[in-house]
Image (spheres, rainbow, N blue to C red):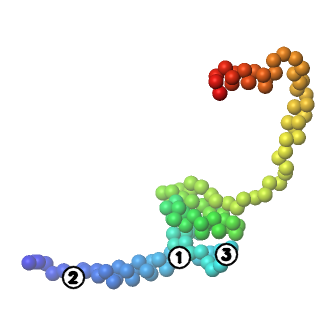
Amino acid sequence: MFEKPIDNVVTRDHISDVKAKKAQKARVVYPSSKSGAVVLQEAVALPGMGLTIPVRAAKAKLSALLELVAAGTPVTITSDGKPKAVLRPVEAPTEHLGFEPAWDLLESVPTQKEGPFSEDLIRADRDGRGW
């Protein structure tokens, strides 16, 4: 049936072994803030960018990535090999963002003493619409 002999055959077992060896080489293990360690197979540590992971792997391992970020490790998410986002730990605000300047402005605005007040105008509008 075959005229040429088949001399280059790769068995399924050989392919499984090659994939297992490749996965062991690419595996990066980082400590977790919880128990044990986090295993991210697609993660790569690049100089200047830190831990880098493709967007598909980030979607699949989001909880593990959040644990890493909470522990202080910034993570760069890439798409097509280009950085798209950086996950960093949340920093506490250094200054109080209050409304002190707004109080000065409110105090400078004169109060209404006569004429139709806003409450009366809103009530008349609402009653006219049948609400």
Amino acid type, callout 1: Arg
**Marks 2 and 3, how far apart in space?**
52 Å
Nearest to the eye among marks 1 and 3: give it. Answer: 3
Residue marked by disc 2: 7
Q: Is residue 59 above or below residue 117?
A: below
Tell which residue pokes out farthest to the left in this image: 1
Q: Is residue 52 above or below residue 116?
A: below
Looking at the image, residue 52 sits to the left or right of residue 128; the answer is left
Q: Is residue 114 above or below residue 94?
A: above
Amino acid type, callout 2: Asp
Which mark sits nearer the N-terminus, 2 or 1? 2
Kindly identify the residue that appears in the image at 55 percent across and 72 percent down. 40
The local crowd at label 3, few if under 14, some if 14 to 19, many if 20 or more residues have their Cα within 10 Å, is: few
Looking at the image, residue 69 sits to the left or right of residue 4; the answer is right
Residue marked by disc 3: 34
Nearest to the eye among marks 2 and 3: give it. Answer: 3
Looking at the image, residue 39 sits to the left or right of residue 88; the answer is left
Query: Label 3's element?
Result: loop
**Marks 1 and 3, how far apart in space?**
19 Å
The local crowd at label 2, few if under 14, some if 14 to 19, many if 20 or more residues have their Cα within 10 Å, is: few
Query: Label 2's element?
Result: loop
How far from the left and from the top, in percent, is residue 25? 50, 78
**Marks 2 and 1, how far apart in space?**
34 Å
Q: Quadrant of the N terminus?
A: bottom left
Residue marked by disc 1: 27
Kindly identify the residue that appears in the image at 72 percent across and 59 percent down. 90
User: Marks 1 and 2: in contact by CB < 8 Å?
Assistant: no
Kindly identify the residue that appears in the image at 47 percent across and 77 percent down. 23
Amino acid type, callout 3: Lys
